[in-house]
Amino acid sequence: MEKFHQKMLSQTKAIWGKILNHRFLKKTADGSIPDDTFKTWIQQDYIFIREAIPFIAVLLAKAPLNLRENFVEIISALNTELGMFRKNAEDHGVNLENIAPFPMCHAYNQFLMNTAYNASFEEGFTALYAAEKIYLDSWMEVKTNLKIQSPWQEFIDNWTSEGFQQYVAWLATTLDDLAAGKPERDLRRMKAIFLITARYEYLFWEMAATKEGWIV
Ligand code: MP5
């Protein structure tokens, strides 16, 4: 029988396909991505991750006792990741001071915060799994199609590492456990959150590729 996380992936197959074929990822893999495009992504993803820490912290406050330690570790990993961003930004001359989120990044972070605060722990966890699984698959796609050593190698390695793969596998099995025995109404809400998160993830690559900021 299809597990819950597999059901979520099946219902978003078309979006996943569009994400993995996104020109941002293709150009990162073949080395043709313009520097300023990648640097825009670095700035926006830095903000995204920085603002994901309070999202995780709210989930931590709602988490069942057996998952608390995992959430402490997730916060610590995000903090380490921010350090990796700062180091790479410095090496490549990317400004991370006084930068503001673009509308799409802002909306995505707001959606995550709202989900953490106002929806169930299970729904928040669903968003977390979707976001992490998409990053794993996206960067795996880049790694698989990499033509030359990338100037952005550390980012590629970050989300394709053995440790990250194990973390995403853990998220999948934990999501299955959380979904087990839940009434259909709750599962429908989790499904809706998964779908919206996948759509936001597509838009995040699109935002990086177009550099669409506030137009007024
Ligand atoms: C992640 C990310 C992965 N960094 N940015 C977006 C837009 N989606 C997902 O999260 P993490 O915490 O960096 O592994």
Image: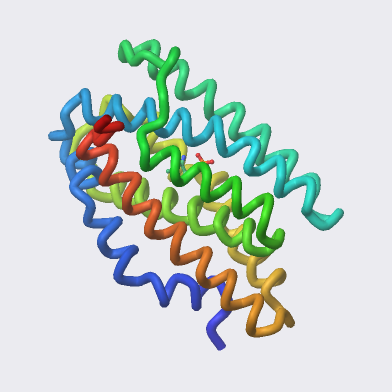
Residue depicted at x 21% and y 24%: 36
Compared with 170, 154 (above or below) is above
- Locate residue 3, reporting x and y percent: 57, 79
Left or right placement of residue 5 versus residue 195 in this view: right
Residue depicted at x 63% and y 58%: 125
State the residue in front, 174 or 195: 195
Residue depicted at x 25% and y 61%: 18
Left or right placement of residue 34 versus residue 98 in this view: left
> Toward which corner of the image does residue 90 lie, by quadrant?
top left
Q: Which residue lies most toward the left here?
A: 32
Q: How are the residues colored?
A: rainbow
Q: Which residue lies most toward the right here?
A: 65
Quadrant including the N terminus: bottom right
> Toward which corner of the image does residue 159 lie, by quadrant?
top left
State the residue in front, 21 or 120: 120
The mark tally for this picture is 0
Compared with 95, 156 (above or below) is below
Left or right placement of residue 140 versus residue 123 in this view: left
Quadrant including the C terminus: top left
- Locate residue 30, reporting x and y percent: 16, 40
- Locate residue 77, reporting x and y percent: 62, 34
Compared with 45, 166 (above or below) is below
Residue depicted at x 37% and y 59%: 199
- Locate residue 87, reporting x and y percent: 45, 16
State the residue in front, 22 or 137: 22
Q: Which residue lies most toward the front here?
A: 216
